[in-house]
Amino acid sequence: MTLAFHNSGGTAVRSGTVTLGTHIIGSLGIDWATIQSTERLPTPIAANTHKNATWTVCVDAWRVPLGMHIETRDVSVEWH
């Protein structure tokens, strides 16, 4: 999963976290579960700039039976 972080503020972002919500979707489109993972932001992000970051999203194979798939749909960021 690749995300672009834009700091439109007047000071640098020095720390923070991003939480990714990966959904386990059944063959009929039913959302069976959401697995969350939290990663550190690619800091520092200087004022009025942007920075890209990429993470590999992993889910245990037993959570995704045959015919199901995963989608990372939810992203939230907490700036510290």
Image (tube, grey):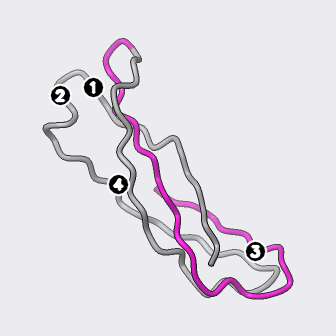
- Which of the 4 image quarters holds residue 23? top left
Q: Are marks 1 and 3 in contact (CB under 8 Å)?
A: no
Which amino acid lies under the numbered mark 1 shown in the image of this protein?
A: Met
Compared to 20, does 52 lie above or below?
Answer: below
Q: Are marks 2 and 3 in contact (CB under 8 Å)?
A: no
Q: Earlier in the sequence, mark 2 or mark 4?
A: 4
Helix, strand or loop at label 1? It is loop
Q: Identity of the amino acid at label 4?
A: Val
Residue at 70 percent across and 75 percent down: it is 50
* Residue 69 percent location from the top left of the image: 31, 31
Q: Is residue 38 above or below residue 63?
A: below
Q: Would you name the residue on which mark 4 appears?
A: 57
Q: Is 21 placed above or below 69 here?
A: below
* Residue at (51% x, 60% y) in the render: 2
Q: Amino acid at mark 3?
A: Asn
Q: Mark 4 vs mark 3: which is more N-terminal?
A: 3
The circle on residue 68 is 1
| Label 3 secondary element | strand
x and y, in percent, of residue 20 in the image: 47, 53
Q: Earlier in the sequence, mark 2 or mark 3?
A: 3
Magenta span of residues: 1-28
